[in-house]
Image (cartoon, rainbow, N blue to C red):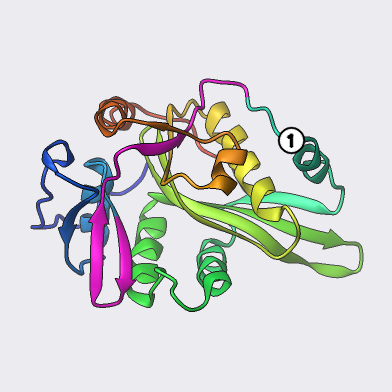
Amino acid sequence: MPTEPAPTEIRFPDPRDAPGDVVAVGVDFRAGTLLSAYRAGIFPWPQSSRRVGWFSPDPRAIFPLEKTPHWSRSLRRAMRAKDLSITVDEAFADVMKACGDERREGTWIVPALVEGYARLFKLGWAHSVEVWETSENAKPVLVGGIYGVAIGRFFSGESMFHRRTDASKVAFAALVEKLRAADYELFDVQVQNPHLESLGIVEIPRDAYLDRLEAAIGKTAKPLGDGR
């Protein structure tokens, strides 16, 4: 079971009363603050290390875990590649760093944010899925991954990366399969874009999202995985 972090004095406003997507502004990446935000349906989106907005978008983008995924032919082929292997929680820090490196300038994955999520990972609230390229005579190479925060039967996907064609999609698909197998009910991907839409992401009203969030975080899920 995850360990509760030290309590925070920060109190976030109710997103249901927010006139827009930004519900708060401020820099605080302590584990307790991050966890309180996710429990309230809010996530940080830094513009810099000193300017951080806390968002609860309306509408909200989610992957419908209750439906059987229908992956594209190319993704199914990539998932069957014999030189790829999937792990869970074996390289969380490396996945998060790679997500930041891939975006280079303008990344919201600032060092203080990395420290906060690393703390959540150590406490058991954050997880990663890794995609490795393997060969007989070489050490496995990390070529894709995704990380996020899990509370009860809720998972919030934060970012993903690839260093090989479709490796991020393989990581996403592997995570979906693991979430479904572990009885998760809500997979939040925050904000829609064409890439996510191609994977089956849909949008729902913020109030509907918050209702589902409240139900999901109050339940217990199975472990996501046990490594390779």
Residue at 36 percent across and 55 percent down: it is 123
Q: Number of marks in the image?
A: 1
Residue at 66 percent across and 48 percent down: it is 169
- Say whether residue 47 is magenta: yes
Quadrant in which residue 73 is drawn: top right
The amino acid type, in three-letter code, at marker 1 is Ser
User: Which quadrant would the N terminus be assigned to in this image?
Assistant: top left
Q: Position of residue 3 (x, y in %)?
A: 31, 49
- Of all residues, the one furthest to the top in this rendering is 67
Q: Which residues are magenta?
A: 44-68
Q: Position of residue 148 (x, y in %)?
A: 45, 51
- Residue nearer the viewer, 110 or 184: 110
Residue 228 visible to an observer of this rendering:
no
Left or right of 19: which side holds 196?
A: right
Residue 24 visible to an observer of this rendering:
yes
Q: Position of residue 89 (x, y in %)?
A: 55, 54
Quadrant in which residue 39 is drawn: top left
Residue at 35 percent across and 57 percent down: it is 120
Against 212, residue 131 (above or below) is below
- Of all residues, the one furthest to the right in this rendering is 136
Left or right of 42: which side holds 153?
A: right
Q: Position of residue 173 (x, y in %)?
A: 64, 40
- Residue nearer the viewer, 146 or 206: 206
Q: Secondary structure at mark 1?
A: loop
Quadrant in which residue 31 is drawn: bottom left
Left or right of 33: which side holds 9?
A: left
- Badge 1 local density, few (<14 within 10 Å), some, or many (20+)? few
- Say whether residue 73 is magenta: no
Residue at 75 percent across and 61 percent down: it is 164
Against 97, residue 146 (above or below) is above
The residue pinned by badge 1 equals 72
